[in-house]
């Protein structure tokens, strides 16, 4: 079943001890869409400015499973742009700049043919935009959102309103503790359930992820990558969500067991993303490689 995603399409500048990449295709929506498209057809809703490089469009167009009907170009606006730098400990990142561009304008419009979407993912962008878009999908079976430190800092009231209306939230451990003042992922997840969602996935980088659901708790380790395989962690969170939601849309089920299984797909997709700068690795990935890695992960992560 089709999976709708909204969020940012960005022009990213990435710096890491392993090298750098200037003005490459990025943004929450781009990473999510590409990852999810290996598992389900994706409907993308987003906006870019007149400065969006044609080669970035060409990269997305290669993915036949992504419909770009909802990608709006605003010729006199600027595309969202972001710069990030990883420290020697690649789990730590600092933002060099955030140029909001089109994000400061009206939300992108949803094409009428997308309005019947049942599976909806609200990737990282302004929470007021996420809420506005969410309300345009009256037939949704499940809506999940992501967020990050910037929005927790500058738009907490809008975020809290968003949490009242979504089914699930995916975020990392630092963001979860920033929101709830709980350091432990399970305690933070439980505190977030009190705000409205039925489940929360707290990602813990190289330590895996925890699903805190009204029906139970599940944990999953990270894929055991060696340090030399981690080239650029950018987009790991968005591709994790893409794998998780892609699995949900492909099965049409969103109960606790399906979400638990989806964590493995998310983990595997993220493990590819970090192997090269930006979207480079995902752009040369095929379904066979994903299936092989999922089997290897299932065997490595077996409990008991
Ligand atoms: P991740 O590494 O999963 O946190 O995602 C990184 C991507 O998020 C980059 O491609 C950025 O363009 C995008 N990004 C960075 N800051 C924001 C923000 N405040 N809102 C939405 N997207 C962002």
Image (spheres, rainbow, N blue to C red):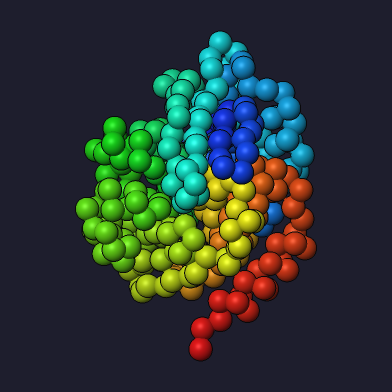
Q: Residue at x 51, y 89 (%)?
A: 304
Marks counted in the figure total 0
Q: Quadrant of residue 70?
A: top right
Q: Is residue 72 above or below residue 209?
A: above
Residue 63 visible, this angle = yes
Q: Quadrant of residue 249?
A: bottom right
In what quadrant of the picture does the N terminus appear?
bottom right
Q: Is residue 210 above or below residue 300?
A: above
Tell which residue pokes out farthest to the top in this image: 76
Q: Where's residue 239, x and y in %?
A: 57, 51
Q: Where's residue 264, x and y in %?
A: 56, 67
Q: Where's residue 183, x and y in %?
A: 27, 59
Q: Quadrant of residue 240?
A: bottom right
Tell which residue pokes out farthest to the bottom in this image: 304
Q: Residue at x 52, y 53 (%)?
A: 241
Residue 135 visible, this angle = no
Horizontal relation, residue 58 to residue 259: left or right:
right
Q: Where's residue 187, x and y in %?
A: 26, 64
Q: Residue at x 56, y 36 (%)?
A: 15
Q: Residue at x 50, y 69 (%)?
A: 221
In this rendered view, identify the residue nearer to me: 53 or 183: 183
Q: Is residue 74 above or below residue 121?
A: above
């Amino acid at each position: 079943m089709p999976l709708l995603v909204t969020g940012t399409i960005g022009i990213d500048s990435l710096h890491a001890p392993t090298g750098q990449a200037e003005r490459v295709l990025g943004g929450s929506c781009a990473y999510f869409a590409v990852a999810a498209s290996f598992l389900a057809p994706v409907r993308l809703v987003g906006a870019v400015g007149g400065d969006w490089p044609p080669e970035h469009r060409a990269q997305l167009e290669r993915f036949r499973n992504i419909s770009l009907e909802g990608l709006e170009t605003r010729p006199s606006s600027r595309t969202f742009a972001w710069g990030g730098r990883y420290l020697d400990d690649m789990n730590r990142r600092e933002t060099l700049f955030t140029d909001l561009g089109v994000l400061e304008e009206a939300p992108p419009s949803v094409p009428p043919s997308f309005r019947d979407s049942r599976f909806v993912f609200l990737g990282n962008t302004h929470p007021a935009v996420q809420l506005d878009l969410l309300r345009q999908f009256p037939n949704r079976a499940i809506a999940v959102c992501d967020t990050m430190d910037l929005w927790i800092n500058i738009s907490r009231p809008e975020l809290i309103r968003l949490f009242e209306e979504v089914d699930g939230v995916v975020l990392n451990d630092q963001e979860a503790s920033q929101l709830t003042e709980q350091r432990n992922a399970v305690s933070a997840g439980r505190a977030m359930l009190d705000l409205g969602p039925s489940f929360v996935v707290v990602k813990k980088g190289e330590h895996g992820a925890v699903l805190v659901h009204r029906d139970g708790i599940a944990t999953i380790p990270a894929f055991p990558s060696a340090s030399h395989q981690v080239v650029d962690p950018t987009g790991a969170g968005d591709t994790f969500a893409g794998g998780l939601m892609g699995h949900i849309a492909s099965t049409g089920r969103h109960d606790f067991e399906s979400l638990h299984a989806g964590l493995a797909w998310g983990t595997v997709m993220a493990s590819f993303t970090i192997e090269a700068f930006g979207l480079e690795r995902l752009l040369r990935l095929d379904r066979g490689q994903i299936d092989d890695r999922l089997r290897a992960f299932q065997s490595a992560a077996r409990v008991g």
